[in-house]
């Protein structure tokens, strides 16, 4: 949802100054380039070295394989070209929980609330100076949008978005004729690929309440950035739930695995684990995570204590309160969480892990590509209605017309 309202205007303004500014030279000479006349910002992030190599079973450079057709709530079936979410033969996933080595905590910080889109409020915990391009994650927003606000017509290229509704409902519509609604507990996985233009607008709830949810932006492997767009709506009724009532733990397995409970397959193209965890006061849990995946947890409510590395190495626990993000290192087999017995309320957090992509990230708002030339091309394709954006010409969403300016 980052910069989406201003992208169309910014691209048009860019075209007006291209005759006077050598964009390619500008990109090669600065990390953050500013064209003041158009108020355009371009951020370039170079690849970061990984603490561990990616397991060889992830074929990031080979030809994409098309397997079973994936259905979705938008009646738009597209072959699944992504990578499997659960690595085979991963020793970290096979370890008994009592033998799991907890990952160390790299940092924790408060997600500050800010304005975004048109009338929306978000707490951004990935995609800020605190945590930028934590591969494969580009952005995480905890959003609140009321009727009359929202995210009207805007483009995407080169990434995936995962939207999780916690309260209310959000309508979706794109230039290919796909439309639908996700409600409380539902998710939408959207692979933008070579290009999509769509709108995301809140529903008018009968009680007038706001619509609340999470949106995660995930980078695509370079070989998949030019794939065809794809949607997969995941309904709350499809999400398997792992429960231990005696221990006071409930886990909605949105993507990935909790013990012997596995999620629905073929959701995001880039492997991402997404677990919605609720723990009662006095509860504790250990969660295995794939080796080498980057991981973090975002606290939705209450507070949980996370182990900071193994106790044998002097690791302690850190209490993480509401609206804070806690980022884990790659070393270790998983995370260990607990809730103090005297806590005033249960703790609820989203545990997220994903496969790091060893590739450059060049981002201009909703365009996420891998080189300076590709971001220049993306802007020209959007402006010229080419290479994936042909249907953007003269398109206007119906739901976007409800925007109150």
Image (tube, grey):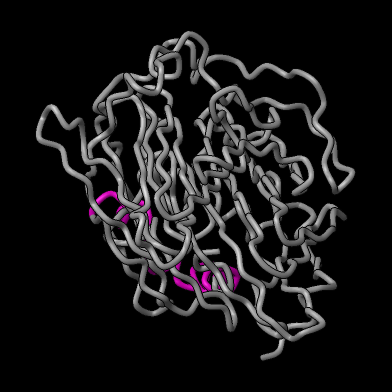
The quarter of the rendered structure image containing the C terminus is bottom right
Residue 9 located within the stretch drawn in magenta = yes
Q: Which residues are magenta?
A: 7-29
Q: Is residue 350 left or right of residue 241?
A: left
The N terminus appears in which quarter of the rendering? bottom right
Main SS, magenta region, reads helix
Kindly identify the residue that appears in the image at 54 percent across and 40 percent down: 246
Q: Residue at x 37, y 62 (%)?
A: 343
- Residue sitting at x 38%, y 39%: 295
Residue 234, quarter of picture: top right
Q: Residue 366: x, y in percent?
A: 53, 57
Q: Nearer the viewer, residue 315 or 247?
A: 247
Q: Is residue 42 visible?
A: no
Q: Is residue 156 magenta?
A: no
User: Between residues 42 and 242, which one lies in front from this camera angle?
Assistant: 242
Query: Taking 12 as reference, is 299 above or below it?
Result: above
Rendered location of residue 320, percent (x, y): 31, 57
Q: Nearer the viewer, residue 291 or 216?
A: 291
| 210 left or right, relative to 79 | left
Q: Is residue 5 visible?
A: yes
Relative to 296, residue 71 above or below = above
Q: Which residue corresponds to the image point at 62% horizontal and 76% vertical from the top-left?
A: 145
């Amino acid at each position: 949802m980052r910069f989406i309202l201003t992208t169309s205007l910014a691209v048009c303004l860019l075209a007006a100054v291209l005759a006077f500014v050598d964009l390619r030279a500008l990109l090669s000479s600065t990390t953050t380039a500013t064209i003041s006349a158009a108020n355009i910002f371009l951020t370039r992030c170079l690849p970061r070295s990984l603490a561990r190599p990616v397991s060889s079973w992830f074929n990031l450079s080979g030809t994409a394989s098309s397997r079973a057709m994936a259905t979705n709530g938008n009646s738009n079936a597209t072959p699944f070209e992504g990578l499997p979410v659960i690595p085979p033969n991963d020793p970290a996933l096979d370890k008994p929980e009592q033998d799991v080595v907890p990952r160390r905590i790299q940092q924790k910080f408060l997600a500050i609330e800010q304005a975004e889109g048109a009338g929306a409020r978000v707490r951004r915990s990935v995609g800020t100076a605190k945590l930028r391009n934590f591969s494969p994650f580009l952005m995480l927003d905890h959003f609140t949008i009321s009727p009359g606000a929202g995210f009207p017509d805007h483009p995407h290229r080169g990434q995936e978005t995962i939207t999780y509704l916690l309260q209310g409902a959000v309508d979706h519509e794109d230039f290919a004729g796909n439309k639908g609604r996700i409600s409380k507990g539902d998710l939408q996985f959207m692979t933008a690929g070579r290009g999509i233009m769509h709108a995301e607008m809140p529903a008018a709830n009968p009680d007038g309440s706001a619509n609340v949810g999470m949106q995660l932006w995930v980078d695509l492997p370079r070989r998949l950035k030019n794939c065809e767009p794809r949607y997969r709506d995941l309904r709350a009724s499809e999400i398997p739930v792992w429960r231990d009532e005696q221990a006071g733990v409930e886990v909605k397995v949105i993507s990935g695995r909790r013990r012997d409970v596995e999620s629905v397959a073929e959701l995001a193209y880039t492997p991402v684990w997404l677990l919605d965890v609720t723990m009662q006061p006095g509860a504790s849990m250990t969660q295995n995570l794939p080796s080498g995946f980057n991981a973090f947890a975002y606290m939705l409510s209450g507070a949980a204590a996370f182990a900071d590395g193994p106790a044998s190495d002097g690791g302690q626990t850190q209490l993480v309160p509401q609206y804070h993000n806690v980022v884990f290192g790659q070393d270790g087999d998983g995370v260990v969480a607990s809730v103090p017995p005297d806590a005033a309320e249960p703790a609820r957090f989203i545990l997220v892990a994903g496969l790091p992509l060893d590739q450059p990230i060049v981002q201009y708002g909703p365009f996420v590509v891998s080189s300076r030339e590709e971001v220049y091309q993306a802007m020209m394709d959007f402006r010229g209605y080419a290479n994936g954006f042909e249907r953007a010409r003269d398109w206007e969403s119906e739901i976007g017309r409800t925007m109150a300016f």
